[in-house]
Amino acid sequence: MAMLMNKVAIVTGAGSGMGREEAILLAREGARVTATDINEAAVLAVVKEIEAAGGEAIAFAHNVASEEEWVNVVNGTIQKFSKVDVLVNNAGISLAVGLLDTTMDQWNKVIQINLTSVFLGMKHVIPHMETNKGGSIINISSIAGLTGSSGAGAYTASKGGVRMLSKAAAVDFGKHNIRINSVHPGFIETPMSSDLVHDDRMLQWFLSQTALPRIGQASEVAAAVLFLASDASSYITGIELPVDGGVTAK
């Protein structure tokens, strides 16, 4: 039986990369999916792919840093599907700029998209999960949220914030049977990382950091998200799950 039968999931940043794989996998496992992305054309294509495979999904163009747009996404999901069981806060951006060279505009943009968006998503979804007497929230962080990351102070701060915000919310809302966990991808091949992954020097450096001798795939992050979204993880909350090929083990 499908792992998410009769569940409703919202996935942000679903137009490409990890978010795309997450939305497609959750739909394949029975969830009705609200897929959102700043790139409307991309997320509409993902919804068409889900529907072509027999799934059910709707799409929203979505700036995750906007509270008004979060209200529209959540209200639209409730109107269409009547509830929300799963929230995957996947949308994010990277910034490889040293601390002293980071401008205020850069700092604010990274914090708003990577961290404030997670706060807004939980703020507007959790009341519906409380009404529904449970739910699962998966916040996508990074291995940079577990260890220091050279030359990326704003990004590292935002992803560390996602980790600790997830823990705080897990403690607050466990009594409502709402589970909240963070996932920490390592070196994953996505459109965002394709230039680096296909640069031989960078690829060799990535591989030198991992225990497993390869780069990870977005589908492997999606599999971790599926586990945390499903009842298979029903007694798991407040954890950080690295999907990193063993980087943090080293």
Image (tube, rainbow, N blue to C red):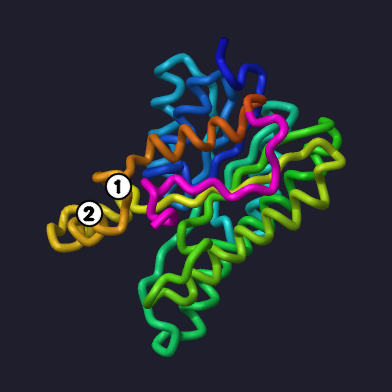
Could you tell me which residue is drawn at 79 percent across and 51 percent down?
171
Q: Is residue 132 above or below residue 37?
A: above
Closer to us: 153 or 63? 153
Q: Are marks 1 and 2 in contact (CB under 8 Å)?
A: yes
Which quadrant would residue 247 be assigned to in this image?
Answer: bottom left
Q: Amino acid at mark 2?
A: Val
- Quadrant in the picture for residue 11: top right
* Residue 168 image offset from top left, x and y in percent: 75, 57
Q: Which is more N-terminal, label 2 or label 1? A: 1
Residue 232 visible to an observer of this rendering:
yes
Give x and y (percent) for residue 81.
Answer: 68, 26
Q: Position of residue 218 (x, y in %)?
A: 37, 40
Instruction: Decide: is 173 above or below 208.
Output: above
Main SS class of the magenta portion in the image? loop
Q: Which type of secondary structure does the marked residue at label 1 adopt?
A: strand
Residue 140: where, in percent of width, then height?
53, 50
Q: Quadrant of the C terminus?
A: bottom left
Q: Residue furthest left?
A: 200
- Residue bearing mark 2: 197
**Label 1 sits on residue:** 189
Q: Residue at coordinates 18% horizontally, 57% vertically from top-left?
A: 204
Q: Which residues are magenta?
A: 233-250
- Amino acid at pointer 1: Glu
